């Protein structure tokens, strides 16, 4: 299917992170070329992009704590731009960047752009194929979990869009596979895990503690609720739960 649509440039503010909290002093500006004006059914069909389940993340971190495995993180920069497109897609030349003479020419995209509806799915397919080439096998039960096995041991890769964890008992093998992964994409090596999916991670001997305190503080600041009154529970004051009898019929749609 041939598709033709336009694009626009969007300026956003980005912040470097120190652990989890963002610092306005290090905030800067960056520009993205993003897609726009797509029509469902004509310009795109499938858009669902699988990600790892939160329950799986908790399970892998619990196993890492009990078995004292290495947990190392990686962040893929501009991940969607690596997504290979299967469709035949054309785009108008960006405003301000047109070729001088053939201004009426259009551009054919071979890789995805931010704002493209199928960009997430295209990135996941590219990532899945890349993980297979590295020797990983994807799980059918969880699309964001990949396992590598050889005579030296095994490595578990937990991937949520552009955030990845490499987990395993053999630290040398973990670092080796992580380096191979980083050679395929432009990545930031996060080293020993301290934060993942808005969860702050504290690792201490045989324990791994998770909390979202920093994320909640960021949300409160954004909503200007730092000085709001606290409540012990979100339930109404004076609420008393009633016991449920085994004979009580519960509506399954609730």
Image: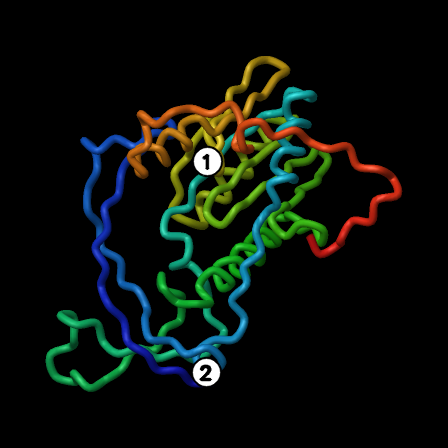
Q: Is residue 16 above or below residue 210?
A: below
Which of 31 and 77 lies nearest the eye of the viewer? 31
In which image quadrant can residue 32 be found?
bottom left
Is residue 193 in sight in this rendering?
no
Q: Residues within 10 Å of mark 1 (few under 14, many from 20)?
A: some
- Label 2 residue SS: loop
Judge left or right: residue 254 versus residue 6.
right
- Label 1 residue SS: loop
Q: Is residue 137 above or below residue 97?
A: above
Tell me which residue sits at (73%, 35%) in the image.
151
The residue at which mark 1 appears reads as 198
Q: Residue furthest left?
A: 100
Tell me which residue sits at (55%, 63%) in the image.
48
In which image quadrant can residue 70 be found?
top right
Q: Position of residue 1 (x, y in %)?
A: 47, 85
Tell me which residue sits at (42%, 24%) in the image.
230
Q: Position of residue 200 (x, y in %)?
A: 47, 27
Q: Residues within 10 Å of mark 2 (few under 14, many from 20)?
A: few
Which of 4 and 230 lies nearest the eye of the viewer? 230
Q: Is residue 71 above or below residue 156?
A: above
- Circle number at residue 42: 2
Marked residue nearer the N-terminal end (1 or 2): 2
């Amino acid at each position: 299917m041939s598709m033709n649509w336009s694009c626009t440039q969007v300026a956003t503010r980005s912040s470097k992170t120190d652990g989890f909290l963002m610092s306005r002093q290090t905030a800067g500006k960056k520009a993205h070329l993003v897609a726009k004006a797509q029509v469902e059914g004509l310009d795109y069909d499938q858009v669902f992009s699988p990600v790892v389940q939160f329950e799986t993340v908790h399970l892998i971190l619990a196993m890492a704590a009990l078995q004292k495995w290495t947990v190392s993180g990686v962040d893929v920069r501009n991940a969607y731009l690596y997504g290979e497109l299967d469709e035949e897609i054309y785009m108008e030349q960006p405003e301000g960047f047109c070729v001088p003479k053939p201004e009426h020419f259009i551009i054919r995209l071979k890789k995805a752009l931010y704002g493209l509806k199928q960009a997430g799915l295209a990135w996941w397919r590219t990532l899945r194929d890349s993980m297979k080439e590295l020797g990983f096998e994807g799980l059918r039960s969880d699309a964001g979990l990949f396992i590598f096995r050889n005579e030296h041991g095994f490595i578990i890769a937990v991937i949520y869009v552009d955030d990845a964890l490499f987990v395993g008992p053999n630290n040398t093998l973990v670092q080796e596979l992580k380096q191979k992964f980083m050679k395929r994409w432009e990545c930031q090596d996060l080293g020993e895990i301290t934060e993942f999916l808005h969860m702050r991670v504290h690792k201490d001997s045989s324990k791994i503690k998770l909390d979202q305190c920093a994320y909640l503080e960021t949300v409160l600041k954004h909503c200007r609720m730092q000085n709001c009154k606290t409540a012990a529970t979100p339930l109404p004051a004076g609420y008393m739960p009633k016991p449920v009898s085994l004979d009580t019929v519960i509506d399954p749609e609730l």
